[in-house]
Amino acid sequence: MLHLKLKMYPQKEIWKDIKGYESLYQVSSYGKVKSLDRTIVDSWCTREFKGQILTPTKHNGKQPYLYVSLSRQGKVKKVFIHQLVAETFIPNPGNKPQVNHKDGNPQNNLVSNLEWVTNAENTQHAYDTGLNSKSKKCTLININTKEIKEFPSMRQLGIYLGKSSGWVYSVVKEKGSKFNYKNYQIKVGDAKCLE
């Protein structure tokens, strides 16, 4: 029996012109970018270009975002695909400056995976989901039931326990990365489970 792994797309793919590059390039709701058919007439010749899907390049920075190079009037500009998708498909009435990948995957540029955020919201999302390398995963063990719960960050554990977002951090500074609280054993980061 043949099993196929299909990538599920939430809706029909929609293509729209990229602002500033109308009739040259389009971006899709699936995060693809394509050049359009065009004719360039110079003083010495006429050239025909067939449109095609552009191959994205992985950025070498801290996050491996995908970008493409767009050309207009002899000038080439590198643009991040998630930025193009958001600018083209997602309203931004709050004029928020950054685009967040909801699932934390910087290469998933589906419009349904993107949202406009402030710097603070983007940073908080990284901590909440454990994407920030400074974020420490936490394990909570109920002493009575032996039930184990895991949290991507100290902040999320604090919220679960009904404490302020910095409470776990302050306890870790005082007691270390393994401690008891009420009927729980708590470990933060790579600490070994309590015996």
Image (tube, rainbow, N blue to C red):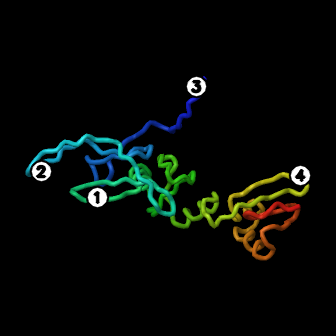
Q: Position of residue 40 (x, y in %)?
A: 17, 47
Q: Which mark is residue 145?
A: 4
Mark 1 lies on a secondary structure that is strand
Q: Which mark is residue 42?
A: 2
Query: Mark 2 Cα within 10 Å, few/some/many (few <14, many 20+)?
Result: few
Query: Mark 1 Cα within 10 Å, few/some/many (few <14, many 20+)?
Result: few
Against 9, residue 41 (above or below) is: below
Against 98, residue 45 (above or below) is: above
Give the number of the mark in front: 1 or 4: 1
Q: Sequence-wise, which precedes: disc 3 or disc 1?
A: 3
Mark 1 vs mark 2, CA separation in Å: 18 Å
Residues 16 and 152: in front is 152
Q: Residue furthest bottom?
A: 174
Q: Amino acid at mark 2?
A: Asp
Q: Which residue is mark 3?
A: 2
Mark 2 vs mark 3, CA separation in Å: 53 Å
Q: Amino acid at mark 1?
A: Val
- Name the side, left or right, on which 41 lies relative to 134: left
Contact? badges 1 and 2 (CB < 8 Å) = no
Give the number of the mark in front: 2 or 3: 3
Residues 174 and 58: in front is 58
- Name the side, left or right, on which 51 lies relative to 143: left
Q: Name the residue located 69 percent from the left edge and 62 percent from the top edge.
A: 153
Contact? badges 2 and 4 (CB < 8 Å) = no
Q: Which residue is mark 1?
A: 76
Mark 3 vs mark 1, CA separation in Å: 45 Å
Q: Sequence-wise, which precedes: disc 1 or disc 4?
A: 1
Mark 3 lies on a secondary structure that is loop
Q: For the image shown, how many numbered marks are present on the structure?
A: 4
Q: Sequence-wise, which precedes: disc 1 or disc 2?
A: 2
